[in-house]
Amino acid sequence: MRRALPYAVSATLVAGAALGLAPAAHAESTSTSTSTGSIRFVDIAGDGGTVLKANVATPAGAAGDRRFPVIVLPTSWGMPQVEYLAQAQQLADSGYVVVSYNSRGFWQSGGQIETAGPRDVADASLVIDWALAHTPADPERVGMAGVSYGAGISLLAAAHDKRVKAVAALSGWADLIDSIYSGRTQHLQAAALLGGAGCLTGRPGPELQQVLGDFLSSNLDKEDEMIAWGRKRSAATHLDALNTNRPAIMLGNAWGDSIFPPNQFASFYEKLAGPKRLEFRPGDHATAEATGLLGLPNDTWTSAHRWFDHYLKGVDNGVDREQPVRLKPRSDAGYEGYPDWASVNAHRTTIPLGGSEHLWANVDSGADGGVIMLSSLLDQFLQAPPTASIPLLPRAFAGVWQTERYDTAQRVRGTARLHTTVTPTAESGTFVAYLYDVGPLGIGKLVTHAPYTFHGKEPGRPFGVDLDLFSTAYDVPAGHRLAVVVDTVDPLYIEHNPTGAQLTFSSPAADPSYVSVPLRTE
């Protein structure tokens, strides 16, 4: 039976870490005993001898020559080394050695923040080396897991270290560029949040400072360098190595993740060749896993435990025979299973975007993607996504197309796609496309959206745009309709519309504009 870390221990460790006084601060190795096992706080030498603050949980009665599967947990961005203590204890109780370490550059670990660079990948392998040398860890049964930053490092480590046999990557990224620069649009609030948290809790290296500065200042002269920096830190770039090593990979994310949107995980999942599983749930960045970090019952962590039990311990728990794609809609509905991601998007309906919409740029119409972290949290717990009054959106600044009311509920599942023709009055510009569920009173609830930015276009010359909106699972009630809205300003993103710029969205007879919406029909 899994249990929470005793509250007094958990609260003391978390409070100490928040004050910069985590137990590993002044000692090479200290330990805390529990009724079923032990937790040690240790220093581990990372790449170049950099000290990584870590903690180790071992099963009760671990002695002699017996070996146990080992799971390595790199911490999330900005989180102290005690982040996973509750999960580590639960895993140790069920027969795992668990080593959690503070990623370099954060809190009391040494070095500078490398943002999942080569030194972070080397650190992960050295932590595995340490675990095999200093704990009863089995070298044939090595797993890695993490939330957010820890997820990204775990995937990269599995591509570079053949010893990693199983991974649970939760609320992470496979493609860093497609996460915070999708549609070639800077995700302003996401980048600012990550940059601010890094400065508060760690020591950003010069490369990160330069890249973040260029990104937020829209230094397009450095765009190729920024993209190359991000590609190096993306597991998708190392797909061949992963498919050669064939670790069993579980990917979990939230529909409303405002830092690492779900599309990039889904695309990456389809290209993996080894054992794999994809899970999407309501929520925002890392909110689907949060209660599990406190030791409370949690669907995401339960799945991760089952994944490791099968692929590291050989338990016949059926996880390998279940539908590998599991989706929980943003409603009260239960989980749905699919054989692959393509099956999620198999059935589609088309919303025609007829006529022509002429917009003045630089003005927020009132259609927005919400506020990072807050909006998707409200949707997760209260089913209250961002809203807009569709009839009141100013048509000078927003283009609007609506369907007729649906006689039956429409279960949107997967990735909606926009195809349209845009004519700009300037060579650069940005627009954001939204899909709304519109009720009888005209109030639209946001289903999904995505930004798009262009540069180097000839003013007055139309060009085609194909844009994937962020993947989702949303039930539109009977009697409601869907609305497509485009405007040019959203506080989530940096926009590139020159002052006085205008955009025209048209639907030529030879190439009609539309939004293709995936629906679950069974």
Image (spheres, helix red, strand yellow):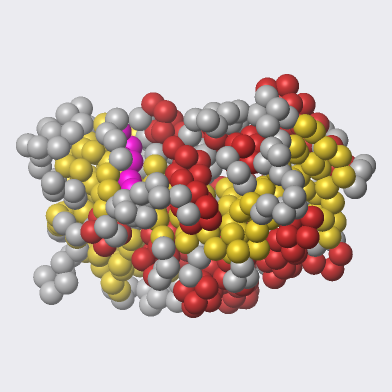
Residue at the top extreme?
8
Answer whether residue 114 is visible to the viewer in this image.
Answer: no
* Left or right of residue 88: residue 234: left
* Depth order, front residue of 50/40: 40
How far from the left and from the top, in percent, is residue 463? 30, 73
Of residues 510 and 69, the one drawn nearer to the viewer in this rendering:
69
Outermost residue toward the left in this view: 407
Q: Is residue 334 left or right of residue 149?
A: left
* Residue at (83% x, 37% y) in the render: 31
Residue 33 in which image quadrant: top right
Q: How many marks?
A: 0
Q: Splitting the image into 4 quarters, where does residue 391 fall?
A: top left
- Reply above or below: 283 against 194: above
**In the rendering, at what x and y percent does residue 458 appear?**
38, 77
**Residue 121, horizontal then vertical, whole percent:** 68, 66
Q: Could you tell me residue 420's position as x and y percent?
A: 25, 65
Residue positioned 87% across, 44% down in the render: 29
Residue found 17% across the figure and 42% down from its top: 410
Q: Is residue 479 visible?
A: yes
Residue range of the region highlighted in magenta in the rendering: 325-331
Front residue of 393 and 375: 375
Q: Residue at x 61, y 59 (%)?
A: 142
**Residue 170 painted magenta:** no
Determine whether 417 is above or below 236 in the image: above
**Front one among 241 and 180:** 241
The residue furthest front is 64
